[in-house]
Amino acid sequence: MNTDIIEGNWKQLKGKAQQKWGKLTNDDLDLVEGQSEELAGKIQERYGVSKDEAEKQVEEWCKEQNH
């Protein structure tokens, strides 16, 4: 799934993102607006993981949403 699809379907995917990353607030997800880099940044911030790990989690999650 590319970032255009994430952005285009963000309202539907936002709930699934919150289920996966429960520490993200609604405000966090509103600010992200489907941008994968912003989502990775929020995951990095809330969970204290590396940038690479956060990007990997977002990439894997995006692939899951594509199925």
Image (tube, rainbow, N blue to C red):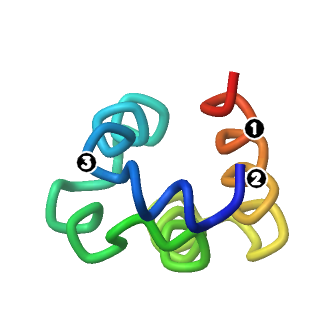
The residue sitting at 26% across, 76% down in the picture is: 31
What residue would you read off at disc 2?
Answer: 59
Image position of 18 with respect to 36: above or below: above
Task: Find numbered disc 1 in the image and state the secondary structure of the residue it sits on.
Answer: helix
Q: Which quadrant would the C terminus be assigned to in this image? A: top right
Q: Which mark is residue 49?
A: none
Instruction: State which quadrant residue 40 falls in.
Output: bottom right
Amino acid, disc 1: Lys
Foreground: 12 or 21? 12
CA gap between label 3 and label 1 equals 17 Å
CA gap between label 2 and label 1 equals 6 Å
What residue would you read off at disc 1?
Answer: 63
| Residue 27, image x, y percentages | 15, 66
Mark 3 or mark 1: which comes first in sequence?
3
The residue sitting at 39% across, 49% down in the picture is: 9
Q: Are marks 2 and 1 in contact (CB under 8 Å)?
A: yes
| Residue 60, image x, y percentages | 77, 42
| Residue 4, image x, y percentages | 57, 67
Image position of 51 with respect to 46: above or below: below
What residue would you read off at disc 3?
Answer: 11
